[in-house]
Image (spheres, helix red, strand yellow):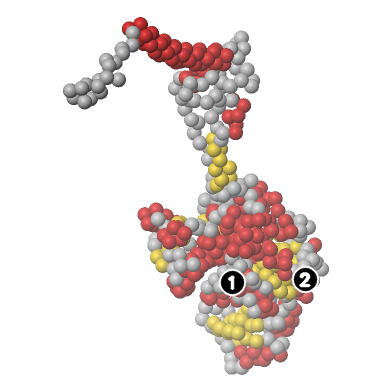
Amino acid sequence: MGIDRALGTPLYPEPLLPPLGAVVACLLHIAVFVIAVLYSCVQKLFLDKNDEGKGKRHSISQKDDKGQHLKNSPAPCDQNGPPIHPERLKDFVEEEYLNGDLTTWEKKVAGNTEEALKGDAEPVLPKVRKSSVRPKNEFMRFEDISAAAFKIQNGVLKTPCMYSRISKQYGVDIYLKKEYLQYTGSVKERGVLYLLTSLQEDQQRKGVIVATDSNFAMGVAFHAAQLQIPVFVIMSAGTSLNRVRICRDYGAMVILFGPTARDAQSHARRLAQENGYLYIEEEDSAGYLAGLGTVGLEIYEQVPSLDAVIFPAGGHCGLLAGSAAALKHLNPKITVIGVESEKFPIVQQALKAGRCLTEHDYLTHPLYGELGGPSFGVNTIKLTKKLIDHIISVSEEDVLLSMLRLLECERATVDAEGAMGLAALISGALPDLKGKRVAVVVCSGNLPLPLLRHCLDRALVLDNRVCKFSVVLPDFPGEITKLLEAIGREDVRVLDMQKENIFLNNDLFTLEVTCLVETRDKSHSSQLRTALVDRYATLKWIDQ
C-alpha cells in the first residue's frame, strides 16, 4: 500500500466497476420473475371463472327433457344465494301458539322454478290465523270445568247437598243442592266469577258493564266489586227498587235508563264503546258454562251412588248443560233431567227446531225471570241434545206447591226457578224415580216480598188449605153466630169474613156472608163442606 508522503494518508486505488454485460443479465432475470408471477395470477383468475361456468352448466344439465328438475337435485337460484331443495320447504314454516292453537304459513315453489325465482317474488298468501280463544260454540271440555272449580273455590260457597224431609211424601230419596245459599242467592255467580277472573288485567282496570236486573247482574255487581273491577249496571226505570238497592250495596254504579230492557241494553253498549268498558251478558260461552258446571262436580262428590239429577231449564239452560257435561263424564249412567214451565217450553221447542227460537229475544216474566236470549244459544242446544236424558214441563200450580213445600219443610225461601226441580216430583211426571236417589238443584232464592206473599197465598189455595164459600142467611140477630159455631165445630179457622145485604136479588131481610177459612188438607176441607151443605141449602163453594 502506498502512502502519500506529503499528507501522510494512505493512497486508495480507483474502485473497479462491473462490466456492462453483467448488469444487463441481472435485469433480465428480474423481468422474467415478474412476468412469471403475473402469468400465474391471470391463469388462476381464468380457471375460477371456468369452474363457475362448469358448475352452472352442470346444474342446468340435471333437468330432464321436459325442463323439470330431478327429484334430489338442488333448484337453480340466484348466484348470491344458497341452493333451494323443494322437498325441504315443508320444514321452513312459521309456528305460533295461541292458547294451544297452531298457526302456520307456507310458501310453495311450483312450475318453472328458475323463472319464478329470477322474476318478481311471488306474493305471500294471506295468513290464516286461528282464534286465540276457542269459539263460543265449541263443545266444552271436562278439563274446563275442573279448571273453573279450582279457580273459583275461594270465591263461592260449596253449598251442601242434604237429604230432605220431603222424601217421605213422594217415595224418593231426595237430596237438595242448596245453591240459594250463595251470597247473591243464585248459582249464576259461579259462572260470573270464572268469567271475571279470566279477564285480562287491562280490561279489569277499565271495568265491565251489564244491562239487566236478573240474578246475573247481581252476581256481576258483587264479584266485580270484590275483585276491585269497576262495574256499571244499567237497569230500566221500572226495575224493583229493592233490586236497585241491592246492586248498589254490592258496590256497583247503577244507572236507570229507559222504560224497557232493550233501551237499557242499547245504552249500556253505547257506554261500553265510548269508554272502553267490557259489555257482559249472560251467554253460552265455554267459560261461563264451565263455571256453572262446577255444580255437577260437587253433587257427584257429595252424594254417592246417585241415580238421577234434576235441574231447572228455561232461564237456567247453562246450568243444565254445564253440569250435565260434568256428570256424564264422571258417570254416564246418571240420568240428567231438565224441567221447564209448560207456558214457556223453549228448550223442547229448540230441540225440535234444531235451533233456539229466542236466542236474540229476551222473554221476561214476573215469576220465571228472563227466558231465552244469548244464554240459550247453539252451544247449549248441542250439549242439551247430546247429554240430557229427559226434558219435562210442569204447570204453574206445581211450581207454586213446590215453593210452599220448600218453605215449610226446608225453611227455604226460593223463587220459581229454584222450585222448578222439585215441582217435577210433585207433579208425578217422573214415576220411574220411585225409591231412587235423586239430587234436586235449588238454584236461586231471590223473590220480591210482595210476589212471595202472593205466591204462597195461591199455593195454600191449590193445596186445599185455604177455602172460600158464601151462604145466604136471614138478616136477624144470632144467625152469623150460628154459622161461626158450625164452622168451629169442624176445627176450622176463619181468616176473613164479609157480609153483603144491598147488592142482592134475594128478599129484603137477607144477607150474604162470604168466609175465608183455613183447613188442614183436602180431606178436612171436604168434611167442612159436607157439614155446611147439610145445614145451609144456599151454600156456594168457590172452587179454585
Q: Secondary structure at mark 2?
A: strand
Q: Amino acid type of disc 2?
A: Asp
Point 58% across, 79% down: residue: 506
Classify mark 1: residues with Cα within 10 Å, few (<14), some (14-19) or many (20+).
many
Asked where in the image residue 144 lies, by quadrant, the reply is bottom right
Point 55% across, 19% down: residue: 111
x, y percent for residue 396: 63, 65
Quarter of the image that includes the C terminus: bottom right
Point 71% across, 74% down: residue: 162
Say whether residue 225 is visible.
yes
Residue under label 1: 182
Reply above or below: 61 against 343.
above
Reply above or below: 170 against 23.
below
Q: Nearer the viewer, mark 1 or mark 2?
A: 1
Looking at the image, which is closer to me, 485 or 461?
461
- Identify the residue at the far top of this view: 21
CB within 8 Å, label 1 to label 2: no
Residue under label 2: 173
Separation (CA) of disc 1 from disc 2:
24 Å
Point 54% across, 43% down: residue: 96
Asked where in the image residue 432 lies, by quadrant, the reply is bottom right
x, y percent for residue 220: 50, 65
Looking at the image, which is closer to me, 321 or 225?
225
Reply above or below: 534 against 262.
below
x, y percent for residue 279: 46, 56
Say whether residue 454 is visible.
no
Left or right of 534 in this view: 498: left
